[in-house]
Image (tube, coloured by chain):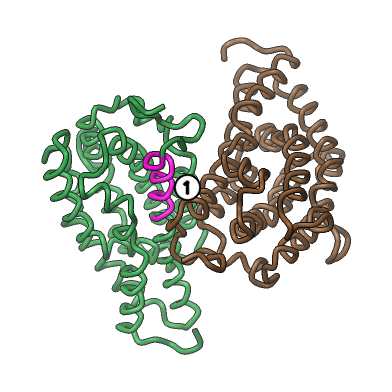
Chain colours: A brown, B green
Amino acid sequence: MTEVLNPDELERRLREIGAERYHNHHPFHKLLHAGKLNRGQVQAWALNRYYYQSRIPIKDAALVSRLTDPALRREWRRRIVDHDGEAPDDGGIARWLTLTDGLGLDRACVESTRGVLPATKFAVDAYVQFVRGRSILEAIASSLTELFSAGIISERVAGMLANYSFVDEQALAYFNARLTQAPRDSEFALAYVKREARTPDQQQAVLDALVFKCDLLWAQLDALYHAYVEPGHVPPGAFVPDGVG
Amino acid sequence: MTEVLNPDELERRLREIGAERYHNHHPFHKLLHAGKLNRGQVQAWALNRYYYQSRIPIKDAALVSRLTDPALRREWRRRIVDHDGEAPDDGGIARWLTLTDGLGLDRACVESTRGVLPATKFAVDAYVQFVRGRSILEAIASSLTELFSAGIISERVAGMLANYSFVDEQALAYFNARLTQAPRDSEFALAYVKREARTPDQQQAVLDALVFKCDLLWAQLDALYHAYVEPGHVPPGAFVPDGVG
């Protein structure tokens, strides 16, 4: 880009990226929400997504550790609290484990992250690394996929409850909490990038950070689809659902 | 592991990992070598693998920068020379570009790494990160996939020359050079880990490093298979061969 966008135009372009590249368009999610997956495939999704969940507060703490403004640190710290909670049975990670429990996965096995697809780890670790190494502006911009999460969460909760006998409302408690947390977080981050990205280069970096984040969410679903929807492609060492050879 | 393996037993276990998990067993390679891919699919492979090639000297330089022994630095430096050469048209990366040229890919486009699958970048970047962050022993052990590369290279050269009219011997010059470089390099690395991994923890770390490396090679082929062999799964922004929608 060679000219500065006004903040609302920047927001429009960010929303355009989401409309094109957010993982709600991924075929794996369509199958998940439509009830087209079997229990083993839903297990594989939850097991792999646990790795993502487990690294989010690490990524957020990495960002907090780089912020020099106490007010900004306090704001971002809330995200760590949301995920880690105030006690072992509280917070987003604990709620994710309620889901994996409900799906019949062994908790120690889930927490060990053994069986997680290597591709999941590479994508998620790339996110942590991005937030550690890029500018604060890019690190904050990479959280902006939250702008698009309310829709996918509502679809997911409704679709999974309607279509899977092995999923109940309690198992999906994680998503209900996110329905209030995500809009609050993404509004803050959006206001931040609209205010702080003032040059064409900064604005391009913000847009690229969101593309990067969309790509890594997409790559996680590609890996799940390849391993667990296409038959015969579970990579060596990864989780094998009962009944899958 | 709880007891120390003798060096030859450690080597046996390393070779066992290769026999089970090296990517010569991957279905994408079987298709590639058997002539079952079309030109666009071979282009996608070469384009993505370029990203891997381009990061190898970066990973090797990261390791050299961590070595305190000049003799070891000299030994490892040779790998950087092998890849970067002595002039723009020399070395492994230049030879890889001869291959992508031969396949009809635009060189500037290849070098930009635009169009490379995000999953390729995540896997390759994880390798660089591993070598930057893990122990020297693990970093060196992660190079040991070279122990298994002679076989796959011979298969590949013979298979590709026999099966693809759009590939000639000059385009495959990269692999001929590797046939002498890889055994020399892997013998050195193998002797190093056999000598330096003296505790059960160190030996386990060496074995795990090789598994990690096999996983990331495998993940790259999974991503290629999913995007370019399974129809309709090219992720947003990635290379689309002519004639693929």
Residue A222, image x, y percentages = 52, 45
A194 displayed left or right of A176: left
Q: In this rendered view, identify the residue nearer to me: B56 or A215.
A: A215
- Residue that sits furthest to the top in the current view: A3
Callout 1: SS: helix
Residue shown at 79% from the left, 48% from the top: A175
Task: Name which residue type carries label 1.
Answer: Asp
Residue at the image point whose x is 81% and y is 45% from the top: A178
In the image, A229: left or right of B69? right
Residue A163 position, x and y percent, is 71, 50
Q: Position of residue A213 (x, y in %)?
A: 61, 37
Res B176 visible? no
Q: Quadrant of the N terminus of chain A?
A: top right
Residue B210 lies, with reference to residue A196, above or below; the image says below
Magenta-highlighted residues? B218-230
Residue name at image x 70 percent, y 70 percent: A107
Q: Quadrant of residue B234?
A: top left
Determine if the magenta segment contains residue B239: no
Quick check: can you spot residue A136? yes
Disc 1: host chain: B
- Which residue bears the numbered disc 1? B125
Considering the whole magenta stretch, tell me its main secondary structure: helix
- Which residue occupies the foreground of this view, B203 or A116? A116
Q: Residue furthest bottom?
A: B3
Q: Quadrant of residue A23?
A: top right
Whole-percent x, y for residue B80 in the image: 30, 49
Q: Nearer the viewer, residue B171 or B224?
A: B224
